[in-house]
Amino acid sequence: MSTKPRIALIVGSTRDSRWADTPVQWMLEQAKARTDMEVELVDLKDFDLPLFNEPASNMWMPSSDPKAVAWQKKIGEFDGFIFAVAEYNHSITGALKNALDQAYNEWVRKPMTAIAYGSMGATRALEHLRMIAVELQMVPVRGAVHIGGADFFAVHPMGGGKPLSDIEANIAPAAKGALDDLVWWANATKTARDASA
């Protein structure tokens, strides 16, 4: 049995026209190239979550919706998270916020980072996500990948539409730093969770 931390790369947009798949595939390659983690792509599109409609979060009582329970079970498999974050009106997508709300216990005491993209690198959205993560008792690491400004407009289809490899030199160091921190915290929190189980 592997002792490497299991990491979910969560696609935070469910739009048919989303660009998320491009940065997600790049980040997946960076994570899979490492030997200190196991990573799995988790796409919100695959879960068809209803809007949160439980009497309370599963911190207080079990969820009744089978789709919410399936989501909680999936999230519970992991020791840490990488979120693909698109910025919509200075925040995260509604789909991602709903997915976060559909679970509680499964996020607790696990680290998170992100690959965030938008004209401003989705900085504001990621800061909102970090605040939500703290409330869910996650451990947001400092490092993240931001695709913004000239880099974003060079690779986004509504801009230059170039391959992500054209900006890789600009974002690869941030990915390494973020993943280094994520693995460190995943190992630390996993050890602590195991000790208190």
Image (tube, helix red, strand yellow):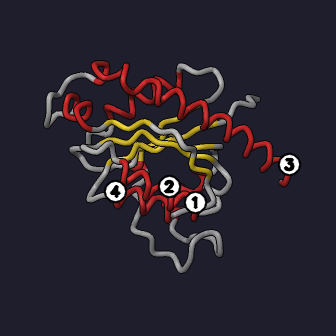
Write the residue at 31% across / 19% down.
165
Residue 134: mark: 1
Comes first in the chain, label 1 or label 4:
4
Looking at the rendering, which quadrant does residue 197 occupy?
bottom right
Comes first in the chain, label 4 or label 3:
4
Q: In the visual, does 114 lie left or right of 137? A: left
**Residue extending furthest toward the bottom:** 55
Mark 2, residue position:
130
- Disc 4 and disc 2: Cα gap in Å? 14 Å
Residue 195: mark: 3
Secondary structure under the numbered disc 4 in the rendered image: loop
In contact (CB < 8 Å): disc 4 and disc 2:
no
In contact (CB < 8 Å): disc 3 and disc 2:
no
Secondary structure under the numbered disc 2 in the rendered image: helix
- Disc 4 and disc 3: Cα gap in Å? 35 Å
Q: How crowded is mark 4: few (under 14 residues within 10 Å), some or many (20 or more)?
A: some
Residue type indicated by callout 3: Ala
Residue type indicated by callout 1: Val
Q: Which of 180 and 60 is in front in this view?
A: 180
Q: How many labels does the image show?
A: 4
Q: Residues within 10 Å of mark 2 (few under 14, many from 20)?
A: many
Looking at the image, is 162 positioned above or below residue 126? above
